[in-house]
Image: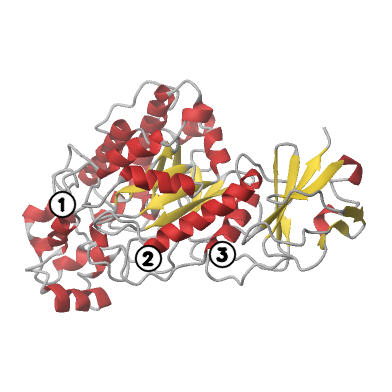
């Protein structure tokens, strides 16, 4: 299948080889917080969400109605005609990178290509790219340079798998999808499988599509050296099995050559559902969490907005506090948070997105010791609030309370993070006299952001801590339980 020779190295294109050789690099487990960026042609119509490209060709959708009323019939104004309005006129990758660093992010991941088939990078394999159309600029390459100058890790996401069926609606009525001159953008436009989560469904991609998918993925690896390569969900289809193994071997062998220290220069593939076997990459849950501690490292990807990944005119924002609560919960369960923003077509980061990032950054400036470079404790935490497990569940739970406490371990300390401000003495039931932490192992208790040592005691009911009189920050509150050497 492959048109790309596998680079010399320990990884062979088999699941067995990948499982035996792969390890998650330490930099990734230490990072805990990254920024995802959905920016593309879909940012121009800014209506509903980033699936506008597909839904404007679905006759029963709100996007179809909006498109015809606003721009005219799809035979005269198709998705391709938005490209000139993706100007990037105010795009300042240095300012972006500085904002992301101020937000406390440790790695940055723009979308290199979404389902819409438009490459935001400089590709030699397609004319439908930001380097040749629209802004006529290598948007991904410029950001990679800026991010690395700020000392942050660079990654990419690649969603091309869904391009196989993304524009199928345009085959069913007069539209520009049917013009072969546009095939490089609109792709095969084959019928969407009835169940996209069925590994064995008929109608999967053919060999030429899969070969092109692989070549373009390998091109991104070679041009930009991303240390995380994120895939969306449809790659779990049986048709992708061989190219997924070939890509992993190609990518990981390339990453081995980028630096001698795998823990600092190594790479990771993000996958959803069961697209990759355990131990060959990092499992990712879209807009969701886990109910308990996972023994192997994992990731949540979610967005600052509830309604869309890309920019829209009417974003329904989450609160910074809810995102911080989720970050703490995820980290306590051995995970990392990848938080998405959606820039405008001119490259401006909306004020609402930027304000959320700055508030998270302010919280991490106070509480970062309880997040970065930490590892999970014996239990993730305690408290009454149920966290619903699985994808698309991150807005379904109730707000965390002061009885919801999460644990992390780092730098000779156990951190116990209250997810709301306690009005009275805190009793941490998991740290009672019969727990893994005994009083004679505790050197002292303080709260990050507050100077004074705190009064504490331990009995069978738990570890009792008297909090400061004034909160040191606006959201979650981290007790540092210093451990004796």
**Cα gap from disc 1 to disc 2, whole angstroms:** 23 Å
User: Disc count in the image?
Assistant: 3
Please tell me which of labels 2 and 3 falls first in the chain. Answer: 2
- Circles 2, 3 touching at the beta carbon (< 8 Å): no
Indicate left or right for 30 with 255 as reference.
Answer: right
Q: Element at badge 3?
A: helix
* Front residue (pair 247, 185): 185
Please tell me which of labels 1 and 2 falls first in the chain. Answer: 1
Q: Is residue 344 above or below residue 256?
A: below
Tell me if residue 294 can be seen. no
Q: Element at badge 2?
A: loop
* Numbered tag placed on residue 308 in the rendering: 2
The x, y position of residue 150, in whole percent, is 42, 37
The residue tagged 3 is: 322
The residue tagged 1 is: 134
Q: Is residue 117 above or below residue 265?
A: below
Identify the residue at horizontal 46%, vertical 29% (top origin): 265
Identify the residue at horizontal 72%, vertical 48% (top origin): 415
């Amino acid at each position: 299948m492959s048109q790309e020779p596998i680079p010399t190295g320990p990884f062979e294109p088999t699941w067995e080889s990948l499982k035996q050789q792969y390890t998650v690099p330490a930099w990734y487990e230490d990072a805990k917080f990254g920024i995802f960026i959905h920016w593309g042609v879909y940012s121009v119509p800014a209506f509903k969400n980033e699936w506008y490209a597909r839904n404007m060709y679905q006759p029963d959708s709100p996007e179809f109605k909006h498109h015809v009323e606003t721009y005219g019939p799809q035979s005269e104004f198709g998705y391709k005609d938005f490209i000139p309005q993706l100007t990037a006129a105010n795009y300042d990758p240095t300012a972006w990178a500085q904002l992301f660093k101020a937000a406390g992010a440790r790695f940055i991941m723009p979308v290199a290509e979404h389902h819409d088939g438009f490459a935001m990078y400089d590709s030699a394999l397609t004319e439908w790219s930001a380097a040749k159309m629209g802004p006529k600029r290598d948007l991904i390459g410029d950001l990679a340079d800026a991010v690395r100058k700020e000392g942050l890790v660079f990654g990419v996401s690649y969603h091309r798998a869904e391009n196989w069926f993304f524009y199928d609606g345009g085959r069913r009525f007069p539209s520009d999808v049917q013009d072969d001159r546009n095939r490089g953008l609109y792709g095969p436009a084959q019928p969407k499988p009835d169940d996209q989560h069925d590994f064995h469904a008929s109608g999967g991609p053919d060999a030429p599509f899969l070969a092109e998918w692989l070549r373009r993925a390998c091109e991104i690896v070679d041009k930009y050296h991303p240390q995380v390569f994120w895939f969306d969900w449809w790659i779990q289809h049986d048709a992708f099995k061989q190219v997924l193994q070939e890509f992993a071997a190609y990518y990981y062998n390339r990453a081995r050559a980028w630096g001698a220290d795998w823990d600092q220069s190594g790479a990771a593939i993000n996958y959803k559902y069961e697209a990759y076997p355990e131990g060959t990459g990092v499992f990712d849950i879209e807009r969701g969490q886990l109910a308990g501690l996972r023994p192997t490292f994992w990731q949540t990807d979610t967005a600052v907005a509830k309604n869309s990944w890309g920019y829209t005119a009417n974003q329904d924002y989450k609160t910074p506090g809810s995102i911080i609560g989720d970050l703490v919960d995820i980290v306590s369960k051995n995970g990392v948070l990848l938080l998405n923003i959606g820039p405008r077509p001119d490259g401006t980061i909306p004020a609402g997105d930027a304000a959320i990032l700055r508030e998270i950054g302010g919280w991490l400036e106070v509480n970062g010791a309880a997040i970065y470079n930490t590892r999970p404790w014996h239990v993730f935490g305690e408290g009454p609030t149920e966290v619903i497990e699985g994808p698309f569940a991150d807005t379904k739970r109730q707000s965390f309370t002061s009885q919801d406490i999460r644990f992390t371990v780092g730098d000779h300390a156990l951190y116990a993070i209250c997810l709301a401000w306690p009005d009275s003495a805190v009793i941490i039931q998991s740290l009672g006299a019969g727990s893994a932490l005994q009083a004679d192992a505790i050197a002292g208790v303080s709260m990050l952001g507050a100077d004074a040592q705190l009064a504490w005691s331990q009995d069978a009911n738990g570890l009792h801590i008297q909090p400061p009189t004034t909160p040191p920050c606006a959201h979650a509150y981290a007790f540092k339980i210093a451990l004796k050497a």
